[in-house]
Structure formats: structure tokens, C-alpha cells
Amino acid sequence: QVHLEESGGGSVQPGGSLRLSCVTTQYNYRSNCTAWFRQAAGKEREAIAAIYTSGGSTFYAASVKGRFTISQGNAKNTVYLQMSSLKPEDSATYYCAARPPWGGSPLDVREYNHWGQGTQVTVSS
């Protein structure tokens, strides 16, 4: 059974940085598309960034482009989200998700059928 586990969340002051990690195990495909989403209280889940683990193509939401960077580790089952210049509006539960490397938009929440449990990020002074 596919399992995704996020880590690295926490509390940080505005302007600070955090790095989230997502480890995927028991995935049936040699490569995948892994994405980060976030959901704030009372809001819909929104896409942040995605990466194709074969080839390394990346995609970002306009709200985080230039501040967040998605990357994969040397172990291809690990994907990171480096978050910089954090703002209070970045506060949310952050989820990673995975799907096969084919399909529609990598930033479409409907494309993903494997999800982690989430990690909380709070940006506050």
C-alpha cells in the first residue's frame, strides 16, 4: 500500500524559512508526479508545487513562485518543499500527494489519489 509521510512543519516568524519533506514508500511505479498542497482552516485545498520525479520538471502556483522550491532528494522517493520569505497567509496544513507520471495538470487536486496525513505550518510573529 502506498504511503506518504510529511515532516518539517512548525512555527516560524514572517520572513522565515522552513523545509518540508515527503517520503513515499510502496509506490508501484518507477517514477511519479509528487505535489504539495495546503489547506487553511475554512478554505479549499490548493496546489502549491509539483515535480515529475523522472526528468525533474517543476510547476508552481503563482502565490508561491519565487519563494518556494520543490525538489527531490538523491533517494527518488523523497521530495522537499523549501519555503522562504514566509507570510502569515502561508499558514496551513501542508500535504504531499503522488500519482503516476501521466494524466492532467500536475496542480489539479483531482489528479491525486495518494495523500499524506499533513504537517502544520504556522507563520506568526
Image: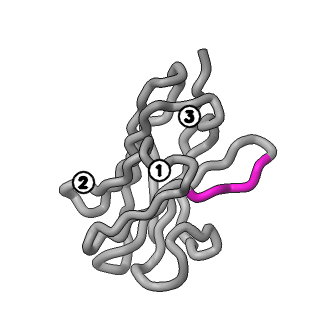
Asked if residue 111 can be seen in this view, the reply is yes
Name the kind of residue labelled 2 in the image: Gly
Residue 80 left/right relative to 12: left
- The numbered dot on residue 73 is 2
- The numbered dot on residue 110 is none
Distance, label 1 to label 2, CA atoms, is 20 Å
Q: Is mark 3 on a helix, strand or loop?
A: strand
Residue 73 in the magenta stretch? The answer is: no
Instruction: Choose top left, top right, bottom left or bottom right for residue 102.
Output: bottom left
Quarter of the image with the C terminus is: top right
Residue 76 higher or lower than 89, as above or below: below
Say how the picture is coloured. Answer: one colour
Q: Residues within 10 Å of mark 1 (few under 14, many from 20)?
A: few
Q: What element carries label 1?
A: loop
**Which residue is denoted by mark 3 in the rendering?**
121
Name the kind of residue labelled 1 in the image: Lys
The residue drawn where x is 54% and y is 82% is: 104
Q: Where is residue 12 in the image (x, y as percent from the top left)?
A: 51, 23
**Which residue is denoted by mark 1 in the rendering?**
65
Q: Position of residue 13 (x, y in %)?
A: 52, 19
The residue drawn where x is 54% and y is 22% is: 14
Name the kind of residue labelled 3 in the image: Val
Distance, label 3 to label 1, CA atoms, is 18 Å
The residue stretch that appears in magenta: 43-47
Q: Looking at the image, is mark 3 or mark 2 earlier in the sequence?
A: 2
Distance, label 3 to label 2, CA atoms, is 21 Å
Residue 51 left/right relative to 42: left
Instruction: Choose top left, top right, bottom left or bottom right for residue 30.
Output: bottom left
Look at the magenta stretch and give its main secondary structure.
loop
- Nearer to us: label 1 or label 2: 1
